[in-house]
Image: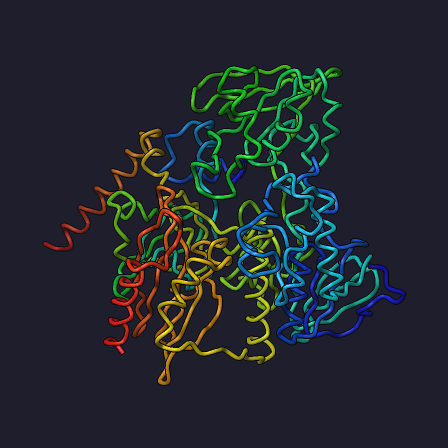
Amino acid sequence: MAETEKPFPPGTYPVVVVGSGPGGLQTSYCLKRVGVKHAVISADDAPGGMFLRFPIFQRLISWTKLHAPVDRGARDYERYDWNSLIGDSPKLGGLVADQMEGKIYFPSRAEMQAGLAAFATKARIRVRWNCEWQSTRHEDGCFVVSTSDGEFKCKVLIVATGMTEPWKPQIPGLEAAPHYAETRFPKEYSGKSVFIVGKRNSAFELADGILAYAKQMFLASPRPPSISLMSFHVASARARYLQVYEDYVLGGGSVILDAAIQRVERHANGYTVHAAGTTKPGDLRFDVDEVIAATGFTTPLGDLRELGVATFNQDRLPAMTNYWESASVPGIYFAGSVSQGAVGLKKHGIPGVSGAVQGMRYNAKVLAEFVAQKHFGIVPSKPRVQVGDLGRFILGEATHSPVLWVQKSYLARSVTFDGNGVIDDGIVPLAEFVDAAGSDALAVVVETGPTGDIYPVVYVRTRGGVQEHVFPSNYLHDFEGPEHAAQLESILKIVQQAR
Amino acid sequence: MASSTDTVELLSSLALFADLSRPQLEVVAHSFEEEFFPEGQRVLRQGIAGSNFYVIVDGEASVRIDGVDRVTLARGDFFGEISVLLNEPPNADIVALRPLRCIALPGTALVDFLVDHPRVMYRMLQTEALRLRATALWQM
C-alpha cells in the first residue's frame, strides 16, 4: 500500500473517515460510489484493523465457503462468504476466498488481512497511514479532527475504529490477570491449570486453543453459556469453539461453571479465584496457575464523550440512531463493528450481526447513501419495478438476497408505491421502515423465529400504519414457490385496495 | 452487559430485582443487555410480533395506543411482559419520551428467567395487581 506521497493532507473535507479496518475500507468504498468526497485516516500502516492482530489464535470464527452453489464474485455468493468486503463489480467480490486454499471453512487471520488488502488495492481505496487521531472539537458547525499530521476539518465525521480496546469488569484483583489480548502461545500453557473469566466467544476460542496443552481448564461467568445452536444468533458461543464444552459435559476434566467471580488473588506461583455459584449456589475457590480475562472489548472513542457523544452498555458503545448517527451529536456516525450500537428490532431477542464483517459491510452501504442524501443532497437514482414483476422480485429477494439472509430482521428490502407504479428503494434499516412516516411502501426481511425456523416477513405501510405479514418457512429455504406467491398476491391486492 | 460494581448497584436499586442476592444480580447483569433509544424512538410496536422484555433504568417512555398517549413509564418500570407471556404482538407502542436506557431480556428467555427467579416473578405479579386495580378503579 506504500504511496510515495501521503494522500489526504490536513485540510478541509466534506467527510473524514477514521479507521482502516473492514468498516473504514467498506465505508470509503461506498462513499466513493455515491460521490461523496472524503479523507480516510488511520493510525495503522496497512489495511486490516483488528485483523492485523486478532483473533489471538490466528483463525477466524466466520466462514468463507470456497465450494459454494453460486459463482464467486456473484452477489449471492456473499451469503457463503462472510468475510470479504462487497463491491459493485464481480472483480471485487470474494477477495478473502481468493486468498484461501479451501481446506478449512474459516480463513486464517493472514488470509483475512490479505483479502482486505486486496480489496483496498483493487477498489483503489486511499488511506493516510500512520496518521493518529488525537483530539476532536466542534467549530463553526464543523468537526475539527486533530491528528499527528495536523488538523482535518469536516462536516461529517465517521468513526470506524472498531471495538478494539481490551475491557475488564470491576472485579477486585482481576486487573492483575492478563486480558484475552495478552494471551501467549498455546504451548506456553503446557501442563498448567488455566482459569478463563468469561463464557462468550473469546473465552471459548481461548479454551479451544489451549485445551490440548493445559493440564485443566476452568471457564466461569454468572450465567449459563449461550450457544449459537440454541440462541440462533452469532453473538452466542459458536459451534466452532465448543470442544471444551463437550469435554466438560462428557467428563473429560474441563470445568465450566455458572459463578460470579468475587475476587482474584495473585501469588508468586499463580492465582486464587474466589467465586459464588449462581445456578448452583455455594462458595467456590480455585487455585490455578493462570487466569485470563476473556471479558471483551470496548470502543476507542477518544475524546468524543467530552464532545457530547452519549454511550451505553457500560460506556462501551456510542448511543446511535437507526442510521448509525450519534444520538446526541448529529454529524458523527459510526461504521464497522461499532455500528452494532443501533440494535434494531431485535425480534425474538435475536440481534443483527453488525458487530461482524458480514453485517457491517451492508450497514456501510446504507450509511453512505444516507449521509450522501442528508448532508450533501445527493439523491440516488432509484430503479422502477414493473408492477407485474413485484411478487417475483420480493420473493426472489427473500430467497436469495445475502443482505436479508445475513442481517435478518435488521435490514430490509423496500419498495415504494407511487402514482406511476413501484420504485425500488433498495436496502433500509427495518426499524426505520416500521417507524418512519412515509409513502405507501412494502418491505421484506428474512427472520429467524423463536424456534429457529427461518421465514420471510413482509411489512406493509399504508396511510401511516404498518402491518406485519409472517410467511411460512420452507424446508429448502425456497420462498419462490406457489404457497408464498399466493400469500404475497393476496397482500398486494389489499395494498391496491387500500390505495 | 458484563458485571461490575456499578451495574449490580444499579440493578439492586430497581424494585423488580430488590430481593435478589448479589450473585443473582450478577446473573441478571449478564442475562439482560442494555439498550439505548433516542427520543421519539419506538421500543415496542403495536401489532408487530417478536418483541422483548424491558426494564427502564433511565429516562421516560410513553404507552401509546392507536396514537394516543395513555401512561408514562419511568425508571424501574417494566414493559413487554404481557406480549411475551400471551405470545401476542404488543397492543401498544412504547415510545421514548426522552433518551431512554433500558435493560432488555429476549422474550424467548423470559419464562425461564421468571421460573428461575421466583422473587422477581412475585414482584412482577405485585406490579400487575397494582395495574389491574388501577384499571378497575378507573373503569368504575
Q: Is residue A323 above or below residue A181?
A: below
Relative image position of residue B73 (x, y in whole percent)? 34, 53
Residue drawn at (70%, 28%) of the image: A176
Horizontal placement of A168 versus B42: left or right?
right
Horizontal placement of A388 versus A233: left or right?
left
Q: Quadrant where the C terminus of chain A lies?
A: bottom left
Residue drawn at (41%, 55%) of the image: A446
When asked about the image quadrant of residue A187, the answer is: top right
How does the figure colour the protein chain or chains? rainbow
Residue drawn at (64%, 72%) of the image: A33
Relative image position of residue A348 (x, y in whole percent)? 38, 47
User: Is A269 in front, or is A489?
Assistant: A489
User: Is A479 in front, or is A430?
Assistant: A479
Q: Quadrant where the N terminus of chain A lies?
A: bottom right
Q: Is residue A94 above or below residue A413?
A: above
Relative image position of residue A373 (x, y in whole percent)? 56, 76
When asked about the image quadrant of residue B127, the answer is: top left
User: Is A220 in front, or is A496?
Assistant: A496
Horizontal placement of A80 versus A307: left or right?
left
Relative image position of residue A254 (x, y in whole percent)? 57, 18
When asked about the image quadrant of residue A167, the answer is: top right
Which residue of the protein is positioned furthest toward the right in this rendering? A4
Which residue of the protein is positioned furthest toward the left in this rendering? B140
Would residue A63 be seen by someone viewing this image from the given angle? yes
